[in-house]
Amino acid sequence: MTATMPGADAAAGRPGGDQGTGWVAALYRARGWLWVVPTVPAAVLALLIMVVLPPDQTLDNVAEWAFKLSPFAFAVVAVALLPKWRAAPGLLLLGVIGYMAYIDTEMVMRIQEFGRNAEQDGSFEPVYQFELFITTFIVLFMLLAYRLGGARTANVLKTGVAAILVVVSGLNDLTFWALNDVWAAGSRPSELPWASHIIVFTGVPSVATAVVFMVVHVVLAAVVIALPVGRWVDRALGVEPARG
């Protein structure tokens, strides 16, 4: 089933059509430049965390968890709001070039630096910090390709939110626990004391607690994906399902 908007201008997405009233309609009318609004805090916060503040592997409280996650969330919104530029293939190619020219090399260099200073306290934190950056880059690059490939804002946004839920679910902590064979204590632990993004909510989690935490987040991600956000936006904009 397709949807049509009353009025030729609205159907073509041009100003002047009946685009509804309220805050959703106001945002829709500003869609050409609205992506800049979340881009600015995303960039500023990312620079603050990646460049200004020292690398930190441990989250101390929920506020710090939210602060460290905020650039990711802002960037998801920014990508979802991007216009569908004709230069999309070139932009995606620039992303690949940026990855190969900087991100890949920087990660190797940080691993080498860790290898030279493994005995020093905090030597792994720059590696951990950049690994989180790479995870964020991969998700955002996926969303960028989805958006520039023609996906509507509502679908990109809910895909991004679902991806964030999976990223913070602790899935990788559980796979690390299950697959890693080298432990300082000599055997696989019964708790995940390194998973501070879980600890700030539950305390030091047992494996069972971490599994429940992960399952809840994955289920929430599935719920977000299933939400008819596009339909809600269409209704707010005055779009009606086409008949026949």
Image: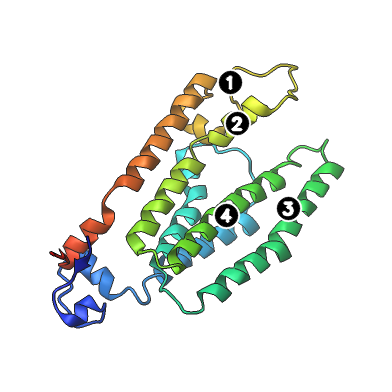
- Type of amino acid at the residue the image marks with label 2: Thr
> Which of the two residues, 185 or 225, is positioned nearer the viewer here?
225
> Which of the two residues, 105 or 192, is positioned nearer the viewer here?
105
Location of the N terminus (image quadrant):
bottom left
The residue sitting at 35% across, 47% down in the picture is 225
Which badge, 2 or 1, comes first in the chain's sequence? 2
Which badge, 2 or 3, comes first in the chain's sequence? 3
**Neighbours of disc 1 within 10 Å: few (<14), some (14-19), many (20+):** some
Q: Position of residue 193 (x, y in %)?
A: 60, 26
Check whether the beta carbons of the residues at disc 4 and disc 1 lie within 8 A of each other: no
The residue where tag 3 is placed is: 107
Real-space Cα distance between discs 2 and 3? 21 Å
The residue where tag 2 is placed is: 175
Q: Where 18 sits versus 180, above or below?
A: below
Q: Quadrant of residue 89?
A: bottom right
Check whether the beta carbons of the residues at disc 3 and disc 4 lie within 8 A of each other: no
The residue sitting at 39% across, 64% down in the picture is 151
Furthest residue toward front = 244
Q: Position of residue 62 (x, y in %)?
A: 45, 39
The residue where tag 1 is placed is: 191
- Type of amino acid at the residue the image marks with label 1: Glu
Real-space Cα distance between discs 4 and 1? 29 Å
Real-space Cα distance between discs 2 and 1? 13 Å
Which badge, 4 or 1, comes first in the chain's sequence? 4
Which badge, 2 or 4, comes first in the chain's sequence? 4
Numbered circle sitting on residue 138 = 4
